[in-house]
Image: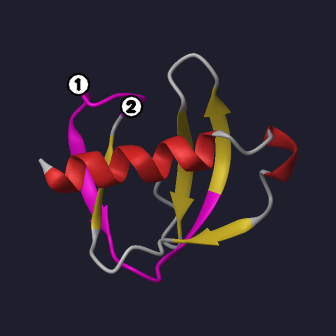
Amino acid sequence: MKKIVIAGLILLTLSTLAPAHADEKYCISDKLSTWVHSGPGDQYRLLDKLNAGEEVQLVQTNNDTHYGQICDSEGRTA
């Protein structure tokens, strides 16, 4: 449950960034790994986890759900 909350907080933080910054790269900065969901909410299936220091790119944000879509270094989106 703690990991889901952390993932939600990270995605919420990323969602506050303007879509104009979609080409900027970010890193998972938590000292733990964090889970990513298949959609913009906790009700969506868990896909995989990202490890601390792993580089991600913010693709888009959803102002209604306050989640962001990211792309990892292997080209997977979540």
Residue extending farthest to the right is 20
Residue 40 at x, y = what percent? 43, 29
* Amino acid type of the residue tagged 1 in the rendering: Gln
Residue extending farthest to the left is 1
In the rendered view, how is the structure colored?
Answer: secondary structure
Q: In percent of the image, x 46 and y 53: which residue is there?
A: 10
Q: Is residue 74 magenta?
A: no
Say if 70 sits above or below 12 in the image. Answer: below
Q: Which residue occupies the foreground of this view, 25 or 16? A: 16
In this image, 43 relative to 14: left or right? left
Q: In percent of the image, x 50 and y 22: which residue is there?
A: 65
Q: In percent of the image, x 27 and y 31: which residue is there?
A: 42
Helix, strand or loop at label 2? It is loop
Q: Which residues are magenta?
A: 39-57
Residue 1 at x, y = what percent? 11, 47
Q: Residue beneath label 2, please?
A: 39
Q: Is residue 40 magenta?
A: yes
Say if 33 sits above or below 47 in the image. Answer: below
Say if 58 sits above or below 42 in the image. Answer: below
- The mark found on residue 43 in the picture is 1
Dots 2, 1 in contact, CB < 8 A:
yes
Helix, strand or loop at label 1? It is loop
In this image, 37 relative to 23: left or right? left
Q: Residues within 10 Å of mark 1 (few under 14, many from 20)?
A: few
Residue extending farthest to the top is 64
Q: In percent of the image, x 55 and y 57: which residue is there?
A: 71
- The mark found on residue 26 in the picture is none
* Amino acid type of the residue tagged 2 in the rendering: Gly
Residue 38 at x, y = what percent? 34, 37
Q: Which residue occupies the foreground of this view, 23 or 63? A: 63
Spatial CA distance of label 2 from label 1 is 8 Å
Residue 9 at x, y = what percent? 42, 47
